[in-house]
Image: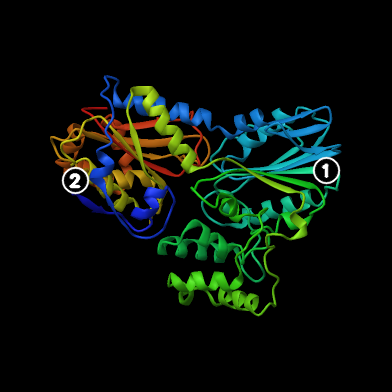
Amino acid sequence: MNEYQLPRGLKDKENLERGQMSSTQAVINVSDVLNKAGERTTVSLRSIVVRGLNSTFAQLNPGEKIKQNLSYEHGLLRWKNKIVARNIENIYAIAIGSLAEEMMLGLLEAIKESHLFQEGLVTISFAAQQRLKTPKVQVYRANPQFFDGNAIRVSKAAISLLSKASGNDVVFFLLSPGARTMLAKPRDPLTPSHLEEVRFKLSRAGATPLEISNVLSHLDEVKGGQLAKVNPLPIQITLAVGDVADHELEVVGDGPTTPDPSTFEDAVEILQFYGVWEKLDHKIKNLLNRGIKREISETPKPGEKGFGRSSWHLLSNTKIFCETLKEEFFKAGRISSVILTDNFVSDPSSIGRLAATFTRAKGLDRPYALIMAGRIQSRRVVKDSPATDAAIAAMPSMTENGKDVLVFLDTAGKDGHSEYSGIILTPEKVHPLLKNQTLMLRIRGGFATQIFQEQGMNINIKEGLGAYGHLVLVLSGTGS
């Protein structure tokens, strides 16, 4: 049997079989997975990719899902036909993340009774075009990738808005990927750069999204349920889109409205486990040590009274995204798909090389599709998506007479909001490129998207919503 080693951060064999996630290194039996081949199709693989993705994103549009599930009629506010509030005086909304504007638009359409809606705030990335025009919603531009001073501005505005609500009001928290760095209020004497230092070093060390949240929640005044505790009087409803397969409510935005079971001791233990503790600025270590001595208050814990009028609802996550995509691929081209993982955490090169190993499998009934989704961690910031780095790493391993097509997608979008970009690699197009040293130098120099587009490899579909991380597909077939 052929066995392949997965990069750190992919599922172990036991958890893979259970459909659960793990950050441990593991070995899986690739032959067993690949033997689940699908029925043959005459539809082009490129068409299947485009149609499947478009349909999947349309189904998981968070604004549409809010409109479908939220309603206000005859004084009753319902979520999925269940009454969540009655006799409401005012409605407020705080939307944070890359999909915040989309979710706010859905909310405003769903409640319709505009006289109830008093005020809201929404974040958008610097590259996004503003669509909200109502004066009742303040728009703040913030960075969905790195901590900076804009996150503090957003936090102060959110605290101010939340403080206006009374016990007869409802406050909606609309959270999506990107909220982590768009919302922050570092504990004194820390700055956004300290939070970024912790986030970056833990990410590079292979910490899970939940572990990173556990640490950041203890360095910040609005994370780990602390934003919700600013004013526990109103009914609080959190609607979230997750970009991980588990612990979404604690991870998206580092859980500003969710009780946090972790402690200062847990935060230090995580930093020490990943070898980050000794490398941190002394201000960070001093603050955490003060927390351990109980000189600083802990984050709100499950069961505290302040969350008695709170509810949390998950709209979608990476796991749902992968399962929906699998169904849509079968509808588009009768291709059977296997979800290899919905939660990898790895660098682009490792993922690229891993994907390429599947293209060398022999004796399989083609076509089939393998789906891998998760987070690609890139050491550099260039014009191209980190997915292009994965594609570059995969190219040398693709055999010249191979039949499999590789698709690398950055579904987080170039602007973190409204588009996703990707590369389709086929053996007949890759190998001429590999023989052209001039083009390869340009590709490695940060011009991958441009070169791939010139070679007819690039897809860039601007209609899809992002936020589901990075996606790798291995599609068997003879062309794109």
Quadrant holding the C terminus: top left
Q: Residues within 10 Å of mark 1 (few under 14, many from 20)?
A: many
Q: Earlier in the sequence, mark 1 or mark 2?
A: 1
Query: Which amino acid is tagged 2?
Result: Pro
Residue reaching furthest to the top: 42
Q: Secondary structure at mark 1?
A: strand
Q: Is residue 440 above or below residue 428?
A: below
The residue tagged 1 is 169
Q: Going by the image, does 354 lie left or right of 139?
A: left
Quadrant in which residue 71 is drawn: top right
Residue 316 percent location from the top left of the image: 54, 39
Q: Residue at x 45, y 72 (%)?
A: 273
Q: Which numbered dot is residue 396?
A: 2
Q: Going by the image, does 111 lie left or right of 189?
A: right
Query: Which amino acid is tagged 1?
Result: Asp
Q: Nearer the viewer, residue 227 or 17?
A: 17
